């Protein structure tokens, strides 16, 4: 699975629960946030002033290597 800016946070966490460590490293509590049910990566990045491209690369690299 390759993640895109439209990928929902909930879907990511359901398929790759261990990826939460990346969200935590960026100060995000996605696994405990009720908004994870409907927010996508682009929304999360904008709301938290994160570089979307960097976040996508980091998440996709994690998936490819695990």
Image (tube, helix red, strand yellow):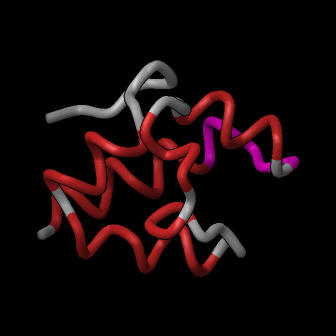
Task: Examine the image and state in which quarter residue 46 appears.
Answer: top right
Instruction: Point out residue 16 in the picture as x, y percentages from the top left corner.
Output: 19, 60
Instruction: Point out residue 26 in the picture as x, y percentages from the top left corner.
Output: 67, 71
Which residue extends farthest right?
Answer: 49
Q: Which residues are magenta?
A: 49-54
| Residue located at (67% from left, 41% from top) | 44
Instruction: Point out residue 21 in the picture as x, y percentages from the top left corner.
Output: 43, 79
Q: Taking 23 as reference, is 48 left or right? A: right
Task: Examine the image and state in which quarter residue 2 appears.
Answer: top left
Looking at the figure, which quarter contains the C terminus?
bottom left
Looking at the figure, which quarter contains the N terminus?
top left
Q: Taking 26 as reference, is 41 left or right? A: left
Q: How many marks?
A: 0
| Residue located at (82% from left, 41% from top) | 47
Query: Quick check: 29 above or below 53?
Result: below
Which residue extends farthest top?
Answer: 6
Front residue of 45 and 58: 45
Q: Taking 55 as reference, is 12 left or right? A: left
Front residue of 47 and 22: 47
Q: Taking 24 as reference, is 3 left or right? A: left
Task: Examine the image and state in which quarter residue 31 appears.
Answer: bottom left
| Residue located at (29% from left, 47% from top) | 12
Residue 12 inside the magenta-drawn segment: no
Which residue extends farthest front?
Answer: 34
| Residue located at (35% from left, 44% from top) | 10
């Amino acid at each position: 699975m390759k993640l895109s800016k439209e990928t929902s946070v909930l879907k990511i966490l359901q398929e790759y629960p261990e990826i939460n460590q990346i969200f935590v490293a960026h100060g995000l509590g996605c696994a405990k946030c009720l908004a994870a049910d409907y927010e996508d990566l682009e929304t999360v990045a904008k709301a938290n002033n994160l570089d979307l491209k960097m976040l996508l690369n980091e998440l996709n690299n994690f998936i490819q290597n695990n």
